[in-house]
Image: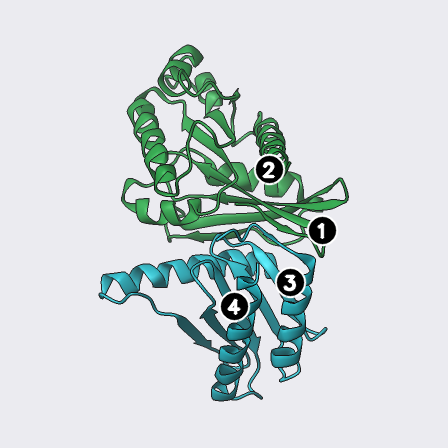
Amino acid sequence: MSFINLKDKVVQVKIVYYGPGRGGKTTNLEYINRTYRKQILSEMVSLKTHGDRTLFFDFLPFDMGQIKGYDIKIQLYTVPGQVKYNATRKLVLRGVDGLVFVADAMEKQREKNIRSLNQLHENLQSYKESIFKIPLVMQYNKVDLKEHGIPILPIEVLQKDLNSRLQVPYFEASALTGYNVAATLKKIISSTVVSIQKKLL
Amino acid sequence: MNYGIVSQEQLEQIDVILTEKLIKLGVDCVIIIDMAGNIITARDNGESKYDVYSFAALAAGNFATVDAMAKLVGEQEFSLLFHKGQDSNIHFSKIDDELLLISMFGKDISLGFLRLNVVDVIEKIRKIWNKK
């Protein structure tokens, strides 16, 4: 749940990047950190293993300016994608306001995407949240690999696998090159802020 | 418990308690966070320059990890944590299921004295919280 400080007029919004391991969640945050350096006052925090895999989470806070006199502080988190880390994934989801599901568009990752999305559904239920209600944006990452001859799932297949029931906004993206990273971020921020406003009214 | 919005009056009362009981004692910085990593309020002595937002995210993660460890050894919870450094120390104490009080202090304050004050502060904050 977002925290609203009426005294200092600050709203803190928690957005989590979720998805299967090696899907590009951390790379999304790293790109945002590099590109919007001027707006980001603090360093990105990454808790990772020696092999550069996310162990607990990455954390990137930034200011989005004001809405109706309230300072909006966006806090971006990633979860560890590896299957064995579900306990930590759940911890990071606590109090989440909006989600980006980073799917790996490589053909061989098809099943992992579906499994990860199903687990997200279960994990949200444990906090009495619903995947059908929480602001969510799909990102089909790694589309740039097509140019390198690596088999990529067609967008129709990804949509059918992951988004046929959810019907949420989606983007093809490449976290490495930055393609649609900002578009994904803008979409999830606007959906989340609108949803928080609705809850308050 | 609905902790999403705290009234201005409640926050002001809490800030006074933190300043009177901890900052005046010599604590460098006090933060109250929720378990999702949001900052409820932060007070400091005007000299410390901590990145409180990153700190809150890490502290919530840290506490959640220790909580999971407690369950593994059959404890209900470890309600306080203490990290000791050469020049600065951090003390974490649970206010309730959702809130955490974090105090950062140097070597001039004794841990025992700090703990006594923390207990007092937590009791007072709980009272304010329950008034809602």
Reading the image, the residue beneath label 3 is B10
| Distance Cα–Cα, label 2 vs label 3 | 22 Å
Residue denoted by label 4: B126
The residue singled out by tag 1 in the image is A9
Report how far apart the C-alphas of labels 4 and 2 lie in the structure: 27 Å
Query: In the image, is A56 to the left or to the right of A195?
Result: left
Give how far apart the Cα atoms at labels 3 and 1 are. 14 Å
Rendered residue at 56%/57% (across/down) = B54
Q: Position of residue A61 (x, y in %)?
A: 60, 48
Residue type at numbered disc 1: Lys
Residue type marked 3: Gln
**Which residue occupies the extreme front position in the image?**
B131
Kind of residue at badge 4: Arg
Q: Which residue is mark 2?
A: A196
Indicate which label's residue lies in the foreground, 4 or 2.
4
Q: Is residue A187 visible?
A: yes
The residues tagged by marks 4 and 1 sit, at their Cα atoms, a distance apart of 23 Å
